[in-house]
Image: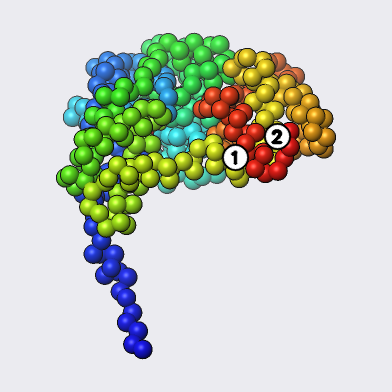
Amino acid sequence: MIVILKNYIEDLLKKPNLFKAEETLSIDYIPEKLPHRDKELSLLSQLFISLITTPNSISRKILITGGTGIGKTATVKIFGKMLINVAKKREINIIYIHTNCRKERTSYKILIKIIRSVLSNFPKRGYSPQDLLDIILETLENNNLHILLVLDELNYLINNDKDIIYSLTRMYDDSFNRPQRISLIGIVRDISCLNNLDSSTLSTLQRNIIKFNKYTMEEIYDILDYRIQLSLKENVISEDLIQMLSEIVYKKGDIRFGLNILWKACKIAENKEMNYISSEILRLSNDTLVPYSFQDLLKYLSPNKILFLLAIVLALKNSETVSISFIKILEQYEIICENIKKQKKSYSQLWNYLNEFKKDGIVSVDIQSKNIRGRKSLIKILDIPLKDLERLIYKTLEEKGVKL
Ligand SMILES: Nc1ncnc2c1ncn2[C@@H]1O[C@H](COP(=O)(O)OP(=O)(O)O)[C@@H](O)[C@H]1O
Ligand SMILES: [Mg+2]
């Protein structure tokens, strides 16, 4: 028998390719235009125009809020580019620094990032945050620079390390006639996390809030259509299907979800040797993206963890409040364990569970410092109706053989 080895590379090259520029469909790609964010860009321009007209006379502090995947990050990055362009033409030195507080979770890391953008080759160790801030301010002064610092996903910093927020918001409080060289844009999804800040910081940040609204279905259509024109070859997807996709995305409100479905759909079509996306492929692609959802998250949790999650859901449901304390959840958890004669897990184990839920995005936890002695954690479930989650939990427990 003669065995002919197939050339897999040649084979792949023969497959249809639906992309014109695949990278422009990625979540991190910042497109040149942002349909339906003109109002927000214009507002930002009005708020920051003084950085150009009267450089270093004022330190602007703005807060942006609004749900996930509605263009907050993209809008601010594009605004940053515009500002730098205008400044350059007029020989005004503005540096735009975009930090993501989910990655840079401490004041120290953020300060290091700032210092690296104004002083190259800065050694990493040996300085306290206060030292770093002093060096930054001195460098800005000596080189006549202004920084626009973006603290994206600021809630992570608020829960972790508030020092830098305090020092940056207070910095120019009592220096009327001195140059003011740092401006701030904070971005948060949910404004309630600000309650964990002290009142003076809160009032500074709340002075200028820009709320980004969810996109309408028509707006989502335009946006997806634009991203499709950038990334896919002509006639890969029909108008009807873009409409169908817009409806799917509208339910989630998150453009990112739409971009992911599109990318996946193209890959599926290519594998099926088709050079366009059919409605069946779009559905398939939507389904295969479900792993991110609660259903699949639950599937991989141990029964013990699911029981604890049930306690959170029931405690929240019974209290009819938006968030609930850890103590209340523990009480509910004890009742459940007693009912089904199951050994309780330890306090620290449950606390670990809670932190894992937080990492998985099932719950959000706000730490409130009430006084010097105690800190109180308030737990919330944001992304799914309690009723649905409860039903899902019962179903999953049953599948795992746990009787309630
Ligand atoms: N108006 C728009 N036009 C084009 N793309 C958009 C628009 N709004 C959001 N996007 C895209 O959707 C994705 C999510 O936007 P992003 O700015 O990261 O959302 P947020 O920061 O609000 O969570 C990004 O890939 C972004 O480029
Ligand atoms: Mg963002």
Measure the alpha-carbon separation of dots 2 and 1: 11 Å
Q: Residue at x 36, y 32 (%)?
A: 248
Residue wearing tag 2: 307
Q: Residue at x 54, y 38 (%)?
A: 295
Question: What type is the residue that disc 1 sits on?
Answer: Leu
Q: Where residue 177 is drawn, which disc sits there?
A: none
Question: What type is the residue that disc 2 sits on?
Answer: Leu
Which one is in front, 289 or 212? 289
**Element at label 2:** helix
Q: Residue at x 29, y 37 (%)?
A: 30
Quadrant in the rendering for residue 99? top left
- Name the quarter where the N terminus is drawn: bottom left
Q: Earlier in the sequence, mark 2 or mark 1?
A: 1
Which residue is at the far left? 234
Q: Residue at x 70, y 15 (%)?
A: 371
Counting every numbered tag in the picture gives: 2
Quadrant in the rendering for residue 346? top right
Bin the neighbour count of mark 2 within 10 Å (Cα to Cα): few under 14, some 14-19, many 20 and up: many
Residue 288: image location, x then y, percent: 43, 45
Q: Is residue 260 above or below residue 394?
A: below
Q: Is residue 394 left or right of residue 216?
A: right
Residue wearing tag 1: 298
Which residue is at the far bottom? 1
